[in-house]
Amino acid sequence: MSTVTVLDHPLIQHKLAILRNKDTGVKEFRELVSEIAGLMCYEATRSLPTEEVEVQTPVALAKCRMLAGKKLAIIPILRAGLGMVDSMVDMIPSAKIGHIGLYRDPETHLPVEYYCKLPEDIENRQVFVVDPMLATGGSAVAAIDFLKSHGCKNIIMMNIIGCPEGIQAVQAAHPDVDLYLAAVDEKLNEHAYIIPGLGDAGDRIFGTK
């Protein structure tokens, strides 16, 4: 079974409290999503392999460790997942970026795919699927299904806020995918929104409501 890591770092939790506030404006909300994603990226990449290298400092030869050439890809689930990409790329500039477009049918709450563009060598990369909210888990499961159909074997899911229903859905469908979250909230309401959550992350990032 996959592991679920909830990141309780004080900086993440402080920023998350501001993110949840209904009075936080679009600019600050967008910046906070990016900052939280950057902080989460440190933990989500902790298991990346390294190798020993020798580096000539101004004083002497040093034995250091560098990433062992593992190719990475960041795949945001459109559209809200875009808000998590930039800060991750700042830290992993060699990562390639793909996009999976899904929306939730308002009646069935099931994901509907409308766009997909992935790096050509996606099957050889460690993939980070990013989306601020893990609600029903439908979009996450569909995105991971699609990635696996393209040969992906190493996938990590990153969400800022999740709930038990979404986590269980991902684990049931993809027990090999580890999850990293900043918070696990109480439940879903009758409209499949996370409670207490923060509302619609996409609308708050892009100022569309």
Image: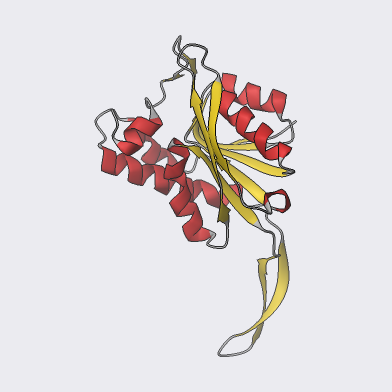
Identify whether 5 is placed above or below 195.
Answer: below
Left/right placement of residue 178 relative to residue 198 reads right
Question: Percent x, y for residue 56?
Answer: 62, 86
- Count of all numbered marks drawn on residues in the image: 0
Q: Is residue 156 left or right of residue 202?
A: right
The quadrant in which the C terminus is found is: top left
**Quarter of the image holding residue 128?**
top right
Residue 135 pos. (x, y %): 51, 23
Q: Is residue 110 visible?
A: yes
Q: Nearer the viewer, residue 88 or 10?
A: 88
Q: Position of residue 15 (x, y in %)?
A: 37, 41
Quadrant position of the N terminus in the picture: top right
Q: Position of residue 114 (x, y in %)?
A: 52, 32
Left or right of 209 on screen, residue 148: right
Front position in the image: 24 or 127: 127
Q: Determine the residue located farthest toward the front in the rendered image.
A: 114
Quarter of the image for residue 138 reads: top right
Identify the coloring.
Answer: secondary structure
**Residue 11 visible in rendering:** no
For the point 64% across and 42% down, the residue is: 156
Q: Which residue is outermost to the bottom?
A: 59
Residue 199 relative to residue 161: left or right: left
Q: Residue at x 28, y 43 (%)?
A: 28
Residue drawn at x 47%, y 59% is 90
**Residue at horizontal 70 percent and vertical 76 percent from the top:** 53
